[in-house]
Image (cartoon, helix red, strand yellow):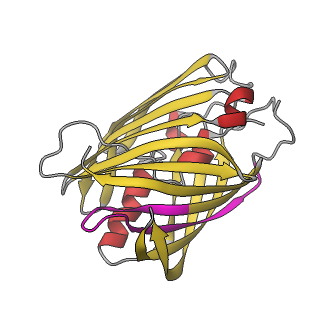
Amino acid sequence: MRLSPAAIAAPIWLALSFGALAQERSLTAAYDIYTGGLQIVELDVALGIDASAYGIEARLRTRGFYATLFSWEQINRVEGRIAATGVAPQRFEQRGRFRGQQRSVDIAYRGGMLEDVRVHPTGDDDYDREVLPVETVRADLDPLSGIVLLTLRLEKGGDCSGGYDGFDGRRRFRIDLTDAGSEAVEVGGRPPRTARICDFVYRQIGGYARRVSWGPDRQREPRLGRFWLAEALPGAPVIPVRMEMDNSWGRMIAHLRSAAIGR
């Protein structure tokens, strides 16, 4: 098994705010992720956003039996601006450790367009991974900013329908979303709240590893999922409160464990 950070990070709200945002709305939250009835990943998350900017950070780590077999931890950060036309990331960084190996990604943007990307290990040392020219991913969003874009659209009265191309520094991916209505769900043990239901399809469309050492090569298989978006607390930003997704190692289910206003 090989954990794919993009496949986890893109559909789930992986946001913990950082940086100074004037008059921001901020939220911290924690998620537990399960497969086969066992917890595999823990997320400590939060969001800081105002009318013109957002700051996001995400902390993930394997837990329980999976942590023994596949020790993995990762921090994702992004800073970006908000404009009438959407979101414009300014910088994205990723720091992590997988099976004792340090891994990092640094992406610089100019005017919301990708300008430079640096990764460690390089593609040659990372399972002989296909390296994508900057020109092919220049307009792609990082894994976190795409979720900000969706959240803003919902808060303005829109629905889930749409899609975007993303790039996490190694993999290029496509996410297509379909609105599936709404239903009442329990949020963190509180009374049920109305949640928007979003169905999605995640497809990796570039940055394939040529040496797959964690089982069958399923990089090109679409992964289906669904998440439920709601206000976890009155007046808080809309975030996923539950998520389900097919992955190469089973059905993944994420639950919101707790949420609080502030950072």
User: Can residue 120 be spotted in the picture?
Assistant: no
Q: Is residue 30 magenta?
A: no
For the record, the magenta segment spans: 220-242
Residue 8 lies left or right of residue 241; in this view the side is right
Residue 176 appears at what percent x and percent y?
Answer: 57, 65
Residue 162 appears at what percent x and percent y?
Answer: 50, 69
Quarter of the figure with the N terminus: top right
Residue 143 appears at what percent x and percent y?
Answer: 49, 46
Residue appearing at x 43%, y 76% in the figure? 192
Magenta-drawn stretch, dominant element (helix, strand or loop)? strand
Residue appearing at x 51%, y 83% in the figure? 181
Residue appearing at x 51%, y 35% in the figure? 134
Residue 249 lies left or right of residue 184; in this view the side is right
User: Can residue 258 be spotted in the picture?
Assistant: yes
- From what the image shows, is residue 36 above or below residue 212? below
Q: Nearer the viewer, residue 252 or 132?
A: 252
